Structure formats: structure tokens, C-alpha cells
Image (cartoon, rainbow, N blue to C red):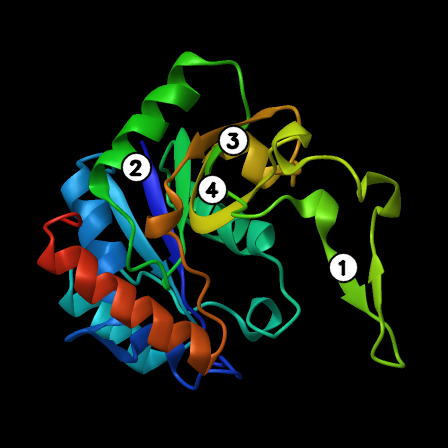
Amino acid sequence: MNICVIPARGGSKRISRKNIKMFNGNPMIAYSIRAAIESDSFDRIICSTDDEEIASIAREYGAETPFLRPSSLSDDFTPTIPVIAHSIEYLQNQGNKIDMVCCIYATAPFIQPEDIKQSLGKIISDDINYCFSVTSYPFPIQRAIKITQDLRCKMFQPELFNTRSQDLEDAFHDAGQFYWGRAEAWLQGRIIFSESSEVYLLPRYRVQDIDTEEDWIRAESMHEVLNKNNILK
């Protein structure tokens, strides 16, 4: 059995009720649920939440909420892996055999069904623990600077100041959309960012982290433009 787990706790701080806030006409979580359904990759789609309102909206859009997540896994410091492991254990205790598990974040309005399906094919065919979405940095990270306490600047890698940008190695970061993993990898707490993982590359125009109000405005504008141009399904 392949399952999707969408973590969506109710206590978001920086953007209140972020997981169900209206985003271009739909609750934010609806985009993740719809993509999971349309990918045709899952036997069950589970929303892991501690919040009754989020659970109700998740069910409205097609996800299951067979449990309310315990408070011990719902604070600001709980990482993702234990949350996914909790869902797997719950289903296993009901007699289900779980094979592949995809964590899809509730705040991923750019997620596409075809990406979910293709990345499942990668983890099935290759000897890896995880396959997850990434995108490239738009600027060489080797030329990054930090601001000191006296508002001066300092390079993280000053030895590379005179190196041409095109001669620097490309770098990538987590796209924050989906993470396929084998059930045993989640249960054993294996690290996602490791040599036992494979990446699924997304274009930068379909990636936006949404942690602040500024992020939200940017993401909503990007989403609207991509929809108008029929780039998003």
C-alpha cells in the first residue's frame, strides 16, 4: 500500500491558520490534496492534524482524517519524520502493510500531480530511501554575504571573491513540496538529506517557501500568473 501523509497542525504562528487560509479561492491545503488525488499514486491520503477545523476541511476536499495527532507531536519543535512515522504506525496497527509513503506539505500550492507520479517511479526503480523535490539557487551561494553586528558585510567564502560566477558549483535547496520515502526509512528515522536519497528537480518558477506575509503575497501572485498561462494543472 502506498499512502500520502499531509501534515497540517493548527498552531502556525507567523501566518495564522496558514494551512486553511484562502489562497486564490481555495483553502491552502486543498491544492496538496487535489494533487495527491490526481496523481493516482496512493491507496490512501491521510491528513495528520491536531485541529478539528483543519480535519473537516481536509475531508471536504478528499483526504481521510482517521485520527487527531497527539499534542506531543504538534508543537513548534516537532520535526516531520516523527509525524510521518506516527501515521505509518497507526495504519500498521490496523493491519495495513505500508510500502511507500509520501509526505506532502499542506502549504504547497504549486505541487503538480505528474511530479508526484514521476518521483514515485524513481524511488521504486532505484535503491534509495527517499526521493524529494528540490530546486536550484538563483545566485551562487559561494558569493553569499552576511551582515555583521555593526552593519558591515562579510563574505562566507572570501577566498572565492575573484572567482567568476560561471565557474562556481551549482547548489540546490529543498523545494518544500513532497518527500517520497520507504516506510522503513520513515520508521527508522533515516535522514532525508543524505547520499541514500535522490532528488527530483523542479523549475524555480514553481517553488516558493511560504513562511511570512511577504512570502504569501509573492506566492499568490506567482500562482495566479501561472494559472493564467496554463502552466499549472
Circles 3, 1 touching at the beta carbon (< 8 Å): no
31 over 233 or under it: above or below: below
The quarter of the picture where residue 108 lies is: bottom left
Could you say whether the residue bearing mark 2 is in a helix, strand or loop? helix
Residue bearing the label numbered 2 = 116
Q: Which x, y percent locates residue 133?
A: 44, 40
At label 4, counting other C-alpha atoms closer than 10 Å, the crowd grade (few under 14, some 14-19, many 20 or more) is many
Along the line of sight, the residue nearer the viewer: 40 or 206: 206
Residue 219, quarter of picture: bottom left
Q: Amino acid at mark 1?
A: Ile
How crowded pointer 1 is (Cα within 10 Å; few <14, some 14-19, many 20+) is rated as some
Compute the Cα span from label 3 to label 4.
16 Å
Picture residue at 37% right of the left edge, 64% below the top: 107
Q: 10 Å neighbourhood of mark 3: few (<14), some, or many (≥20)?
A: many
Relative image position of residue 48 (x, y in whole percent): 40, 62
| Amino acid beneath label 3 | Tyr
The image's mark for residue 130 is 3
Alpha-carbon distance for marks 2 and 4?
15 Å
Q: First in sequence: mark 2 or mark 4?
A: 2
Q: Residues within 10 Å of mark 2 (few under 14, many from 20)?
A: many
The residue at the point 64 percent across, 37 percent down is: 165
Label 4: element kind: strand
Residue that mark 1 sits on? 145
Residue visible at 52% across and 83% down? 14
Q: CA distance from mark 2 to mark 3?
A: 13 Å
Give the answer, above or below, for where 12 lies relative to 78.
below
Residue at the image point whose x is 23% and y is 60% from the top: 31
